Image: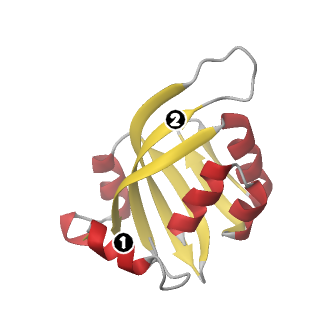
Amino acid sequence: MVAAWHEALNAGDVDRLSDFSHPDVEVGGPHGSGRGAQLLRDWALRSGIRLLPTRVFHDEVRVVVEQEAEWNPAEAGEASSRQTLASVFVVRDSLVTSVSRHPDLAEALLVADLGAQHEVTADHRAGARGSGGEVGSL
């Protein structure tokens, strides 16, 4: 589910992004938080963000993804920027119910109460892609 969410975001497909998200999804970041699929859609379109997952950690409902982020804002004249960050996702009933951005992996893991034992290896991620819409489908 979280992998499909990233794919939709990176493709700029806000309809599909909304399909993978709860209608009352919580969206949080350095400028505060809010709720709703429309907020998520507006953020995705305005920010022009692309997120390349590099590491994944998860338990039954929480997923932490370290990401290489690149922004290409929709506003004319703004330069693109890149940085490494991490996001915490909460997945319930095969939908993202919450996503929050954190400045680094350590903070995201702390917030999600996850650790090294929750890391998903590249081999496991490749095998999980075809397993459906569960949290493990990274």
| Residue 59 visible here | no
Q: Which of the 4 image quarters holds residue 85? A: top left
Disc 2 to disc 1, how far (Cα)? 23 Å
x 48%, y 39%: residue: 69
Where does the image place residue 10, in percent across and percent down from the top left?
60, 49
x 56%, y 81%: residue: 133
Q: Secondary structure at mark 1?
A: helix
Is residue 8 positioned above or below 93 on the image? above
Give, as a three-letter code, the residue at label 2: Glu
Which residue carries the number 1 mark? 125
Q: Earlier in the sequence, mark 2 or mark 1?
A: 2
Q: Secondary structure at mark 2?
A: strand
The answer to whether 84 appears left or right of 76 in the picture is: left
Where does the image place residue 12, in percent across and percent down from the top left?
70, 48
Which residue is outermost to the top?
A: 77
Question: Split into 4 quadrants, where in the image is the N terminus?
Answer: bottom right
The label shown at residue 70 is 2
